Amino acid sequence: MKNIRNFCIIAHIDHGKSTLADRLIEFTETVQKRQMQAQLLDDMDLERERGITIKSHAIQMNYVSHGENYVFNLIDTPGHVDFSYEVSRSIAACEGALLIVDAAQGIEAQTISNLFLALGHDLEIIPVLNKIDLPGAMPEEVKDQIVDLLGCDRDSIIHASGKEGIGIEDILEAVIHRIPAPKGDPAAPLQALIFDSEFNSYRGIEVIFRVFNGEIKKGDKVKFVATGKEYFADEIGTLRFEKEPKMSISAGDVGYLISGIKEAKEVKVGDTITHRDRPCKDFIEGFSEVKPMVFAGIYPVETTEFEDLRDAMGKLQLNDASLVWEPETSMALGFGFRCGFLGMLHMEIVQERLEREFNMTVITTVPSVKFKVTLTDGEEIWVSAPSELPEPNLINFVEEPIIKAQIITKADYVGAIMKLCLDKRGDLKNQIYLTSDRVELQFDLPLSEVVFDFFDKLKTISRGYASLDYEYKNYEIGEMVKLDVMLNGEKVDALSAIVHRDKAYEWGKRLCEKLRELLPRQQFDIAIQAAIGQKIIARETVKALRKDVTAKCYGGDISRKRKLLDKQKKGKKRMRQVGNVEIPQSAFMAVLKLD
């Protein structure tokens, strides 16, 4: 055990985590040259296309130093704030972390928040200054920032470049000397933590775990504590580039377990694995429950695919434990699921993965957040979809979630960012100059304003320099109203939203205009109206397509044409009363992209 090291790589987006992991894998010759490719651990097409890490990836490497053989279990983590739950789970399975900081960009918001996650678990932090080969690198200034943040020695910061392969050996030596070996008793009862899982259509569910105490052998009868289910360990092994079966895995090590589990709900990430005949006394503290920030409905386009979608959601949840869902129904869309996501990017990725990995075509409704509603009779209810909000005369007051947002940016963009946050009903709490050129702004913002396009706008006005990190603060009373969208007098619950009263008029007007462009014209007029309760606040009309009924009259008396036109007019009137409007998917998505 003294030669095992478990560590993860944490950093802000795009500071070079995956590239550095590639160099470590190459240097330790874990993968043969012909199998090597850039971002080796990012095995999802989506990750490669977007150039981001979505999933944490674990891999085991062997390294020889001064005649001693060492085993390294490395976990590469995502950097985006929407995937911070992945990071927190990876951290729970490690003793140390490499904190990567880009020498050109310095410390950013996610760097700080991931660092605090790691310190909360008492991990040993090794600071690494990456990308020192860039022409814009400022190693001395960034080292000052790291020393201020960590309070470490300047000399303990390792200079590296993932692209050029500089400093890789220094990092591996630092891992051996600075990160402690795992503690644990191989003779004690088995105690292992599930920190990830994935679905394999041939072999059932593969569980990825870290053993804290005891030993697990092939063929053992094991028990999952939280679900109480028992299984045979058909195959266990370690995570090399390919899975490598072993006869036993002992305390301190990381491995996988396959036992033909078919049901997705039988595996909970954060659960403890123990022996059936010799269980451990106390199970491991898992991770904190995930707190979804954004709620949206996901519906199958074909109502007959509801059960397939349920299966797909279960399998996806295995691989992405931060996804929360429950069934719901909608008047316009039929049966579907109300899903909780950690942010807008997370929602986009889940929708894309459902379409790619499970061939499900889905409609996503307008995202909203969870509101706390106090009724006139004093009862409190939670509302996460506009359709659940009671009538205005029954509501005493509505409370909305507030977040503490931490924005780190260059000094040049402070004015524009402040204007954006104040437009979003933000409240400036603090402004700290980290250096002469970098500012940290602290705002209290309503989460419902951040959900839609805040992050995109922030990136646009700061040319990509501003970084956002946020945490939940509390609930505060707000003037929230339900804005209904009606087509020909019928409410479309999938398009309604809960908005602040001051913004309702503007929101309704823009939404009606946008829908007028997107709804296909019919043989009858379509009235698009936005309403609060019974009061209509905006209206647009999609004009009817007119069939040329007079085409067959060539010449002749005008009264013949008149007669045909009058007949058409009467038919149109009748048609308007029973006309049905089909709403294209682009209309549901339009709500997300109102500028």
Image: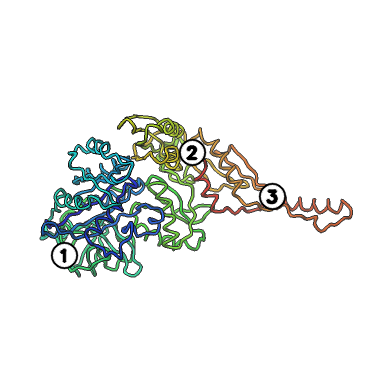
Labels in figure, total: 3
Q: Residue under label 3, please give it.
A: 544
Front-lying residue, 193 or 108: 108
The residue labelled by disc 2 is 499
The mark nearer the N terminus, 2 or 3, is 2
Q: Which residue is mark 1?
A: 277
- Foreground: 467 or 560? 467
User: How far apart are the two marked residues, 2 and 1, measured between alpha carbons?
Assistant: 56 Å
Q: Position of residue 31 (x, y in %)?
A: 26, 63
Say if 100 sits above or below 312 in the image: above
* Camera-side mark, 2 or 1: 2
What secondary structure is marked by label 1? loop
Crowd band around label 2 with a 10 angstrom C-alpha radius: few (<14), some (14–19), many (20+): many
Q: Position of residue 429 (x, y in %)?
A: 35, 29
Vertical position of residue 246 compared to residue 532: above or below:
below
**Which element is circle 3 on?**
loop
Image side of residue 89 versus residue 515, left or right: left
Question: What is the three-letter code of the residue carrying label 1?
Answer: Asp
Lower position in the chain sequence, tag 2 or tag 1: 1
